[in-house]
Amino acid sequence: MTENPPIAARIETKRTHHGDTVIDPYAWLKDPKDPETLAYLKAENAYTDSRTSHLAGLRETLFGEIKNRVQETDLSVPTRVGDWWYYSRSEEGKQYAISCRLPAGEETAPPHIEPGQALEGEEILLDGNALAEGHDFFSMGVFDVSPDGNLLAYGVDFAGDERFTLRFKDLRTGEHVSKTIEGVFYGGAWSADSRVFFYVTVDEAWRPDRVWRHTLGSEGDDVLVYHEEDERFWVGISLSRSEKYLMLDLGSKLTAETRILAADNPEGEFTAFGHGRRQGIEVHVEHQSALPGHDGPGRFFVLHNDGAENFELGWTPEDDTTDFHVILPHSPTSRLEGIEAFESFAVVSLRSEGLTQVGLLTGDETDLKLIEFDEPIYSVSSTSNPEYRTNMVRLGYTSLVAPASIYDYEVTTGQMHLRKETPVLGDFNRSDYRQYREWATAADGTKVPISIVAHKDVEPGSAAPCLLYGYGSYEMSIDPYFSTPRLSLLDRGVVFAIAHIRGGGEMGRAWYDNGKMLKKKNTFTDYVDCAHHLIETGWTSANKLVARGGSAGGMLMGAVANLAPSSFAGVLAEVPFVDSLNTILDPTMPLTVIEWEEWGNPLEDPDVYAYMKSYSPYENVAATEYPSILAVTSLNDTRVGFHEPAKWVAQLRHTATGGQVLLKTEMEAGHGGRSGRYDAWHEESFNLAWILDQVGLADK
């Protein structure tokens, strides 16, 4: 066993920006193919193993608890698309899902299928376990059945770098057809006649920038139909639910436009929707054919933020996409987030007061009918609704105490049908847990929401151990959600809380704008203020509070460790973006140029450089006492390089004092960690055991 941490210093590298000369002694850790780098990461793993070996028994206990609560042989609620019901199922002892379908008749309700039931007529589209055989990692990208139901386009990744191999399968024969295409990104779209497939590829900086047209059966070169040359923008391609239009979506952090092409003319040219690209204006489009009983062209629903911070919803005629008519005007208290068009109604996704909502627009009505739920804190979303001609809207629902559920809402009657609640085996009873919503006060007076869940035996004010989760970037909201592994913490008396901090989207677009660019520090101070609120109100104490966040939330972890190290007993940083200044200074790094509209461009703006340097976690490690820190990363992560936490840990070891600092690198994984469900449970058991150890509950 290795008892002493590895030494990272090798060669000092100078970098100069805006007259600022800096020594970066750990820059050499950036190369994943360098034998010394790999040896260093393996030595760090061995050191982490040695320092956590006392938790081996607890890890196995936690893994058993997670596994024993999960119905391992199970299946999703079937979703109708055309003449088929599609679903996935899992089998005990197998890591990956099996994608299946059944012929559909006249029924509108999904068939009831018992887990493990042998079904006459079932077709297996893909068995993830067979595809993953012989590989340490497996992930799916594109999964798209053609409109006629006969062909499947799917992408596979065996490394974790999110560059997929695209294949085509004839579902009538089970044979693969056409050529295999390497280096494909997420997303794709079929032409209306199921003859042509459009797909996306990335540039050297992992920016999705090109859309290609592949004609099935053709072995020649595919046709480049669009190349986005502006490095701030990404591209995506989809087929409208009505199957009438191919939609080319182009977006940056501040601007979004759509280009359209009739799906029955795949060799045609995409044309700009509406007024085309306008800097700072986001436009999102959904097509709806003429309503039943109406003559003439259809329409496009348009969601935009032109003079409407929280977005406005309107429509344009199909034959004149510049003729805009308002349906739902801007609201300062509700953020419109999405629109989905069906044959005779539309679904609107929005949020208000930090909670998600789903509403309906039927026919030509402009009044939004919200679908209501009983719990005061919950998350709801429209989910898996590919069928255009339907009277049902499928909803996903969860809360901090309610396992994820699937409902079908009947549009004409308002009836809600519970199709499935995710089983939680054992002695789980949701009445054993309580959820709360509290508000912390930030230094500038802003009220920041906190969602809290605890076992019923843990009373507010009991100074219990607590895990505080945070993210706060990209307008991504961390809405209240149920977690089966989390029960292992709650049942041991640990409180779980989510800090809904600025930089996320929980409270509308302004919430996001006030936590990005030159206001990014609000994200970090909001989180610290939430931690102090939990301490001051007696929910927990500083020596029992653990911080957790991943990716941009991992940067948050590094920042708050620098800002308020004495406020936490431990910090768990997963795939953390902690070397943020160096990364954003390097336009050759994946996604950097796209990110300039999120963080600012330190290459061009001295104020941005100075501001980022003042909060970048790696740059600001201090010679003071820190809590224990566990950084978890993956060697093949494209989104956040493994070198960022590796450098950060080395800097902490060299400069800081206090708690133990550990680095754990998954050598066969990507941004989301290990891919198989059992592997993921083992990984989470490692994290939970470490958390329990920090709050003195490793023996519970």
Image (cartoon, rainbow, N blue to C red):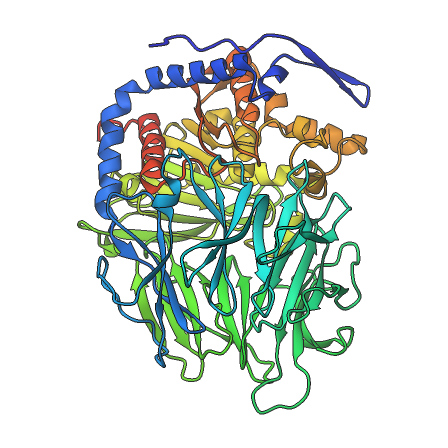
Is residue 374 in view?
no
Above or below, 46 relative to 196: above
Estimate the x, y position of residue 296 in percent, counting from the top left. 68, 88
Q: Quadrant of residue 112?
A: bottom left
- Is residue 604 left or right of 490 when viewed as pictured? right
- Is residue 76 left or right of 576 when viewed as pictured? left
Above or below, 290 relative to 542: below
Q: Quadrant of residue 485?
A: top left
Identify the residue shown where x is 42% and y is 69%: 394
Identify the residue shown where x is 51% and y is 64%: 146
Above or below, 318 relative to 179: below
Above or below, 27 relative to 153: above
Question: Which of the pair 530/293 is nearer the observer?
Answer: 293
- Is residue 271 left or right of 121 when viewed as pictured? right
Estimate the x, y position of residue 281 in percent, counting from the top left. 75, 58
Identify the residue shown where x is 41% and y is 59%: 378
Estimate the x, y position of residue 669 in percent, counting from the top left. 45, 33
Estimate the x, y position of residue 578 in percent, counting from the top left. 58, 28
**Total number of numbered discs in the rendering:** 0
Quadrant of the drawing holding the C terminus: top left
Is residue 32 in view?
yes
Identify the residue shown where x is 33% and y is 10%: 1
Q: Quadrant of residue 384?
A: bottom left
Question: Which of the pair 89/545 is nearer the observer?
Answer: 89
- Is residue 43 left or right of 591 when viewed as pictured? left
Question: Which of the pair 41/421 is nearer the observer?
Answer: 41
Question: Which of the pair 132/108 is nearer the observer?
Answer: 132
Farthest-out residue, left:
427
